[in-house]
Image (cartoon, helix red, strand yellow):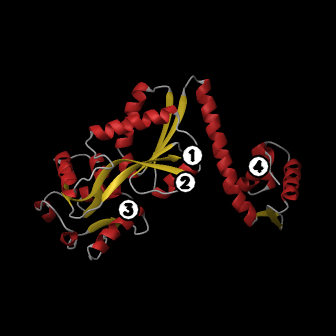
Amino acid sequence: MSMNLRQIEVFRAVMTTGSISGASRLLHVSQPAVSRLLSYTESRLGFGLFERIKGRLYATPEAKQLIREVENVYLGVQRVSELAHDLADGRQGLLHVVSSPSIGQTLIPQVIARFRQSNADVRVTFQFLSYTHLKDRLLNRQADLGVVILPMDHPNLQVTPIARGTMVCICPYNHPLARRSTLKLVDLRPFALVSYGRDTPLGMRIAGMYEAADEPLKAAIEVGSPQNACALVEMGAGIAIVDEFSVRSWPANHFVVRPLAGAPSLVANLVYPCYEPLSQPAQTFISTLRALLAQQGFASPDADVPANDAASELLRHAA
């Protein structure tokens, strides 16, 4: 049996506060009213939402599953409220953008700044997130558009390649590796390596590189993002393998960039829900992003760019 909005509201309030009295205060209604509606909801559903033990409420397994979908409903309602508020203020739209840290550190803020020059009536929200959280935001309709530098696959998401980069090695100035023009993974073995968790997409990509080269992967420091790795290399804590997008977002002259022989390329992808059309602000944002990528010299996604050529461009950027 279905639940109406009032039943959903009461159920969420009890789950949030953990008690009938807490839900009563949250909703500004009497405790008996909350209790009656909750009991009625359980009878209509045909299963219990809470177990009552010694005067306390404990959510059933069914309630714990149900609350996840209820939160999605509330997030949708919140977006409707935000849009209504913006329309009342005379704004022409709302655009939620998310990205992976590598491309979100500098590039996406640059796109937002350029986009806002000709779209000042559109309110933009932006966050860079981990791979898993970014995917969840898009699937839960909490974001309109995502930009990610690793593969993403889901039947409800449209994934469109927009630019290609590569993996490179960065090291401090005056480091022994800085004297070489091109590096192999074996050359990195004697030095402290800053790397990523093997359960992360980037960590798995680098682990695959080492496995293909039959080299042992031993990380001296493990970090959560390429930006963390860049900061540690800048401080002289070690060397790191990072992506081209991260290197280009870091201030020049803070470390040395060297190409890695046989390094895989990375493709930056636009990701958005495929079950609804892109808004006009989202389409304009994408056009602005493509123009900026081309202006900054990123290869097109279908270009076959040798790693050494891509890294040479990075060397000029870091010089």
How far apart marks 4 and 1 lie (CA) works out to 20 Å
Tell me if 28 is positioned left or right of 190 in this view.
right
Residue 38 location, x and y as percent? 84, 54
Question: Which residue in the structure is indicated by mark 3?
Answer: 202
4 or 2: tag closer to the N-terminus: 4
> Which label sits on residue 136?
2
Question: Which residue in the structure is indicated by mark 4?
Answer: 8
How far apart marks 4 and 2 lie (CA) works out to 22 Å
2 or 3: tag closer to the N-terminus: 2
* Mark in front: 4 vs 2: 2
* Mark in front: 4 vs 3: 3
**Mark 3 element type:** helix
Q: Residue at x 25, y 42 (%)?
A: 297
Foreground: 129 or 288? 288
Tell me if 266 is positioned left or right of 79 in this view.
left
Mark 1 vs 2: CB contact within 8 A: yes
Residue 218 in sight from this viewpoint: no
Residue 100 location, x and y as percent? 42, 51
How far apart marks 1 and 3 lie (CA) works out to 24 Å
How far apart marks 2 and 3 lie (CA) works out to 18 Å
* Dot 4 alpha-carbon crowd within 10 angstroms: few under 14, some 14 to 19, many 20 or more: some
Q: Residue at x 22, y 46 (%)?
A: 252
Residue 165 location, x and y as percent? 29, 52
* Dot 2 alpha-carbon crowd within 10 angstroms: few under 14, some 14 to 19, many 20 or more: few
Question: Which residue in the structure is indicated by mark 1?
Answer: 142
**Mark 4 element type:** helix
Q: Which amino acid, mark 4? A: Ile
Q: Which amino acid, mark 2? A: Asp
